[in-house]
Image: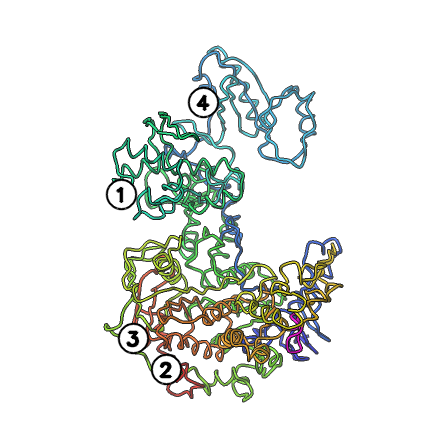
């Protein structure tokens, strides 16, 4: 069968859709936001493909897999097993990195365990094999007559009951073992729990250290080495000192030894490899002096340190005595005190004793001499000793995180950090790179390093297959535009678009054929230059013999597709139909297709008249930004203009705008606690009174959060219902109409509307509640009606329907208007926040901010607001943003979409490349200025668009009036 046949699809808003999609082709599904693209691609095709595959497995296997709901469709034929790659963030686990997600970290661990050369952490010399005579000499250098045990370490951190091993050892004549640090005789040993990890050492010999024991020691060590595969352990039974010996690795100077190199030594998620100080996180929490001294301009008495001012008699009396001893004024501003005195207050008096005056309950004073603990050691002690979550939460306000000082952020213990591979151009005794150094390289540099890696002899043969796998995976990551990331980059700092492309690279690496891949906007967060490589990657996936179905709005992606399906004609209730389908040229010619009109040039986003940008304007200037890869960047933003920051992926846009500018402005305007990335100075902030940063993080993490609750719509709606005469008669307040608290909600399902039923080897089912039938409220609450509808029916309205219903209520209508302005007319008021895409969540936040009264002096920062938007939706969004600017506000956008860039008043282009090759301002000025800059990658693509623009008929201007 050469086509996927769909008949009668009615999932969500699909209206009995029937169509044939060619197999083994690149198919793009496009259309307005809310037109039914995801309903067709994900909730129908992927859901059915995945469901059929899982149902073919045994009942035992099915209990470990999530079974999808059967979509509402009459017939689907020609389906392959389906794999979905969505634009979800990579997760919030601090232990997860790009290396662990792509499994390259596992290959690296194996490589370092097999061909790495261990070095001594202190002397930088390669660890060499120790002979038995060296082991004997090392032990004989201990204090004579010390009681010594020679042990053979046969198990380290291994699960099992070890019954067979113990029986075998007993048969060989061994009597004692040391199990998990405890000496015991094999005869009387209790059975070991096989589910727990154990360390087991065989006691080979026990003796006192004497010069004449040399031969006995040599024989004991030989036996231990034979029994424990080249390892032996000397235990000082008097002092508890241990020394590990290896016939393989040891420092010739200090006899520093390593156990056998194995992959888990290089894992920061395993106790054997993780840095003991930070447990493999790479960061440690600490009490930050900047947070502890919240108001350095105040005096200690007036509250420079919260909780230590004159309102707290005990701590204030301590500081008063301290001031008397060191002769400083407790009423002087803290920041004006000498550095040495500030250190004494924060970190204590050390060994120096001070006379402290204490008052008892009767008002009598006593003097005691002791050292001063210091404010920060006091906080650290309270943090360690408390079991109270409330106290920890309060103390947590003063804590910050910093790079672990012991492992320098590498997450690994010293033994793992000192195993090297390859040649190091730095020379000296150490040759090569450690695993953490390789993982810190940008992926493009990392790939080059592996391609140039040359090993000799057996090492080359062992490494060959492992390196081939690593190179293949790194190539795919580079090809999808992620060359600026590094393998040690934490997963919680990766955007949804980057996470999706990492998954895409992993899929290509798997080399599957005959699969149906369904992707959700893989071009998100990609510059036009990187987009070309992404399209090539998708075509490669298709050429392997797979069907690739992509939900996408990118013009280049649509033009390069084999088949295009245009959904519409509107959003929500007005969508759900196939408006046009065929190859890109056929869709372009179809007069019914809105997408086709934009592709053909019949419609276009107009280039508006530019607002003037000159030196007369007030400017916001951020100087000397140097966070991450930024190279001392100066950012100039004209006030009251639409400003666009662009650049290739990884060029430093987010670091400059989100991590530096947004945080620095928030700290100065709103006294936020967050620390900005390093910068030198900022001028021009007097022209702003607030900053609003709108990102793509979810508006809520639970199904109870929805657009109505987030935007504040639900409060006036509940007040409206509470004001109905029947509700007043019954004494119902607005809380009665909340599904989050007892009173009006259905208690059988606690206001969820559904009840979870565990089905074991079938998927958990969420069935409508038998009591409220999915309405979330109890019968008495649902009897209250406003204009013919109860509260449950109102939550089920789309934004568009709700506006018609609440038109006479200004407080509600204004918020609904802004939701429609940002292109969300199709979402339902009570729709679960977890079902909204990143782009939709961002626009819900934007609408909430738009519905507030504008001061005309606000700085708005938006991170890729066009995510998930069709050409037509982008036009509407630009209208909204231009209204904000026309009111005097400044709008700063991080964006790759050329239609947005061309309409901006001022463009700042970062680059020239990603990662280390970026971090500079390549061009800034009007879009025409940037287009004329040869060094700008953005300028090259922008120039083509601007030259094409005059031939097109604009759909409408993006500015009103």
Residue 31 appears in view = no
Q: CA distance from mark 2 to mark 4?
A: 82 Å
Location of the C terminus (image quadrant): bottom left
Q: Position of residue 99 (x, y in %)?
A: 49, 52
Q: CA distance from mark 3 to mark 2?
A: 16 Å
* Mark 1, other Cα within 10 Å: few <14 / some 14–19 / many ≥20: some
* Mark 3, other Cα within 10 Å: few <14 / some 14–19 / many ≥20: some
Residues drawn in magenta: 785-793
Comes first in the chain, label 4 or label 3: 4
Residue 134 - label: 4
Q: Position of residue 838 (x, y in %)?
A: 52, 66
- Judging by the rendered image, the residue that carries numbered circle 3 is 929
Asked if residue 767 is among those painted magenta in the image, a careful observer would answer no
Q: Name the residue at 38% across, 64% down.
A: 691
Q: Name the residue at 48% across, 79% down.
A: 871
Nearer the viewer's eye, disc 4 or disc 3?
A: 3
Q: Secondary structure at mark 2?
A: loop
Comes first in the chain, label 2 or label 1: 1
Residue 332 - label: 1
């Amino acid at each position: 069968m050469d086509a996927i046949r769909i008949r009668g699809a009615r999932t969500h808003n699909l209206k009995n859709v029937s169509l044939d999609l060619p197999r083994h082709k690149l198919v793009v599904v496009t259309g307005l936001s809310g037109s039914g693209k995801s309903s067709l691609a994900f909730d129908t095709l992927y859901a059915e493909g995945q469901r059929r595959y899982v149902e073919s497995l045994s009942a035992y296997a099915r209990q470990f897999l999530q079974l999808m709901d059967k979509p509402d469709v009459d017939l689907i034929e020609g389906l392959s097993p389906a794999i979905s790659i969505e634009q979800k963030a990579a997760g919030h686990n601090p232990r997860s990195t790009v290396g662990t997600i792509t499994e390259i970290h596992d290959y690296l661990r194996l490589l370092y365990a097999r061909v790495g050369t261990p070095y001594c952490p202190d002397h930088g010399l390669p660890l060499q094999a120790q002979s038995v005579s060296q082991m004997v000499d090392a032990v004989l250098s201990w204090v004579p007559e010390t009681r010594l045990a020679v042990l053979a370490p046969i198990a380290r951190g291994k699960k099992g009951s070890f019954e067979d091993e113990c029986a075998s050892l007993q048969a060989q004549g061994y009597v004692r073992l040391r199990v998990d640090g405890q000496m015991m005789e094999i005869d009387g040993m209790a059975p070991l729990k096989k589910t727990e990890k154990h360390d087991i050492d065989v006691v080979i010999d026990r003796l006192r250290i004497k010069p004449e024991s040399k031969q006995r020691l040599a024989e004991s060590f030989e036996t231990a080495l034979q029994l424990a595969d080249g390892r032996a352990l000397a235990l000082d039974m008097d002092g508890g000192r241990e020394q590990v010996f290896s016939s393989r690795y040891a420092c010739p100077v200090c006899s520093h030894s390593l156990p056998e190199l194995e992959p888990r030594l290089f894992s920061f998620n395993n106790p054997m490899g993780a840095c003991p100080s930070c447990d493999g996180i790479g960061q440690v929490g600490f009490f930050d002096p900047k947070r502890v001294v919240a108001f350095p301009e105040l005096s200690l008495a007036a509250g420079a340190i919260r909780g230590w001012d004159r309102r707290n008699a005990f701590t204030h009396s301590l500081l008063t005595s301290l001031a008397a001893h060191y002769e400083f004024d407790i009423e002087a501003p803290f920041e004006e005190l000498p550095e040495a005195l500030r250190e004494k207050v924060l970190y204590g008096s050390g060994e120096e004793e001070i006379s402290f005056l204490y008052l008892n309950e009767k008002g009598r004073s006593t003097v005691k001499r002791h050292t001063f603990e210091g404010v920060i050691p006091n906080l650290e002690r309270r943090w360690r000793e408390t079991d109270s979550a409330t106290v920890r939460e309060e103390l947590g306000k003063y804590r910050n995180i910093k790079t672990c000082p012991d492992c320098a952020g590498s997450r690994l213990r010293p033994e793992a950090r000192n195993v090297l591979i390859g040649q190091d151009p730095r020379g000296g005794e150490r040759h090569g790179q450690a695993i953490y150094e390789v993982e810190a390289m940008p992926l493009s540099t990392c790939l080059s390093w592996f391609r140039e890696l040359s090993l000799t002899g057996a090492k080359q043969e062992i490494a060959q297959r492992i390196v081939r796998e690593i190179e293949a995976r790194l190539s795919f990551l580079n090809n999808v535009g992620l060359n600026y990331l590094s393998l040690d980059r934490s997963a919680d700092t990766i955007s949804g678009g980057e996470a999706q492309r990492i998954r895409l690279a992993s899929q290509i690496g798997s080399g599957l054929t005959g699969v149906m891949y369904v992707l959700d906007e893989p071009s998100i967060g990609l510059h036009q230059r990187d987009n070309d490589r992404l399209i090539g990657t998708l075509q490669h996936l298709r050429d392997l013999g797979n069907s690739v179905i992509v939900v996408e709005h990118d013009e280049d992606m649509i033009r390069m597709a084999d088949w295009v399906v245009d959904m519409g004609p509107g959003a929500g209730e007005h969508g759900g139909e196939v408006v046009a389908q065929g190859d890109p040229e056929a869709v372009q010619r179809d007069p019914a297709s809105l997408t086709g009109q934009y592709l053909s040039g019949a419609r276009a986003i107009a280039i508006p008249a530019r607002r003037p940008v000159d030196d007369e304007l007030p400017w916001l200037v951020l100087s000397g930004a140097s966070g991450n890869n930024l190279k001392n960047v100066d950012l100039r933003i004209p006030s009251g203009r639409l400003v666009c920051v662009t650049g290739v992926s990884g060029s430093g846009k987010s670091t400059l705008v989100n991590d530096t500018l947004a945080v620095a402005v928030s700290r100065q305007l709103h006294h936020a606690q967050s620390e900005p990335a390093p910068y030198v100075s900022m001028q021009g902030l007097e022209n702003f009174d607030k900053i609003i940063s709108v990102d793509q993080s979810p508006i809520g993490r639970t199904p109870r959060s929805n657009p109505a609750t987030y935007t504040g719509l639900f409060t006036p709606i509940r007040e409206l219902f509470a004001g109905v005469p029947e509700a007043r008669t019954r004494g119902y307040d607005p809380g009665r109409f909340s599904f989050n608290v007892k009173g009006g909600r259905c208690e059988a399902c606690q206001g969820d509307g559904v009840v979870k039923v565990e089905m074991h080897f079938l998927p958990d089912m969420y069935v409508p509640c038998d009591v409220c039938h999915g309405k979330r409220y109890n019968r008495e609450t649902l009897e209250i009606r406003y204009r013919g509808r109860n509260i449950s029916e109102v939550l089920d309205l789309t934004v568009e329907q709700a506006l018609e219903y609440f038109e006479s209520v200004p407080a509600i209508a204004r918020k609904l208007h802004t939701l429609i302005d940002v292109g969300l007319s199709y979402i339902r008021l009570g729709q679960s926040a977890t079902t909204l895409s990143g782009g939709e969540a961002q626009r819900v936040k934007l609408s909430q901010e738009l519905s507030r009264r504008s001061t005309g002096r606000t700085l708005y920062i938006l991170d890729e607001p066009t995510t998930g938007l069709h050409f037509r939706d982008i036009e509407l969004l630009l209208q909204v943003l231009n209204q904000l600017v026309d009111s005097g506000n400044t709008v700063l956008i991080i964006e790759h979409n050329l239609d947005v860039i061309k309409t901006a008043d001022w463009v700042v282009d970062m680059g020239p490349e990603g990662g280390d090759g970026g971090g500079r301002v390549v061009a800034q000025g009007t879009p025409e200025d940037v287009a004329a800059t040869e060094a700008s990658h953005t300028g090259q693509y922008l120039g083509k668009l601007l030259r094409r623009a005059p031939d097109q008929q604009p759909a409408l201007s993006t500015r009103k009036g």
